[in-house]
């Protein structure tokens, strides 16, 4: 069987092809990969910041329907918490697995004035006093 001239040309064409072009160096490929990864991570963090800034952050700052009035530990993983919701107080039993409503009661009229001072936990008061004391001491040494 005779080979046709066009078939011979097709079979011989890889020999006439241009030599393969070398790719980028391994170092440059690594730099491009790291830059791409940092760009994607930066976009993810920017999107999360924008989402928090313009949606959830602004909504939560304006409207908070529930507020924790008080809480006490009654065991290693159990608490009793008073939550104010819509003008009434809910007494909740909170464990690591569940939250149970123990009692519902009307908000006492004197609760607003009394809870302003009680809302600041003792540790926060101690920390504020320690910071103020430290600032006064540093200011006194510089004079």
Image (cartoon, rainbow, N blue to C red):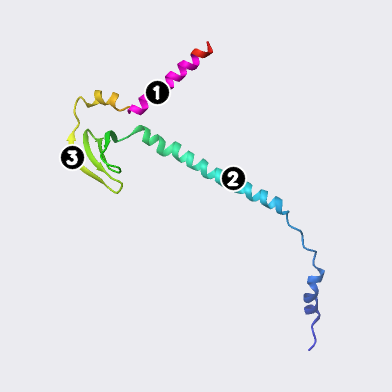
Q: Earlier in the sequence, mark 1 or mark 2?
A: 2
The x, y position of residue 99, in whole percent, is 26, 45
Q: Residue at x 46, y 18 (%)?
A: 135
Q: Could you say where residue 65 lies in the image, as x and y percent from the top left? A: 29, 36
Mark 2 is surrounded, within 10 Å at the Cα level, by few (under 14), some (14 to 19) or many (20 or more) other residues, namely few
The quadrant of the rendering that contains the N terminus is bottom right
- Magenta segment, which residues? 121-139
Q: Earlier in the sequence, mark 1 or mark 3?
A: 3
**Circle on res. 103:** 3
Real-space CA distance between mark 1 and mark 3, rounded to the nearest whole angstrom: 35 Å
Q: Please report the residue visible at 33 percent of the width from the left and 27 percent of the height from the top.
A: 122
Exactly how many numbered labels are in the figure? 3
Q: Residue furthest top?
A: 143
Circle 1 crowding by C-alpha within 10 Å: few under 14, some 14–19, many from 20 = few
State the residue in front, 81 or 6: 81
* Residue shown at the point (21%, 35%) measured from the top left: 89
Judging by the rendered image, the residue that carries numbered circle 1 is 128
Magenta-colored stretch includes residue 126 = yes
Give the SS element for disc 1. helix
128 relative to 101 in the view: left or right: right
Where does the image place residue 129, in percent across and percent down from the top left? 39, 21
* Residue linked to disc 2: 39
Of badges 1 and 3, the one in the foreground is 1
């Amino acid at each position: 069987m005779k080979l046709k001239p066009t078939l011979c040309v097709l079979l011989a064409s890889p020999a006439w092809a241009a030599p393969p072009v070398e790719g980028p160096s391994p170092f440059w490929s690594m730099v491009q990969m790291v830059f791409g990864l940092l760009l994607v991570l930066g976009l993810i963090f920017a999107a999360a910041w924008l989402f928090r800034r313009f949606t959830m952050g602004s909504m939560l700052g304006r409207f908070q329907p529930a507020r924790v009035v008080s809480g006490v530990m009654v065991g290693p993983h159990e608490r009793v918490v008073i939550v104010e919701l819509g003008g009434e107080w809910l007494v909740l039993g909170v464990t690591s697995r569940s939250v149970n409503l123990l009692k519902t009661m009307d908000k006492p009229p004197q609760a607003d004035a009394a809870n302003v001072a009680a809302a600041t936990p003792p540790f926060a008061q101690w920390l504020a006093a320690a910071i103020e004391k430290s600032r006064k001491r540093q200011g006194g040494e510089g004079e």
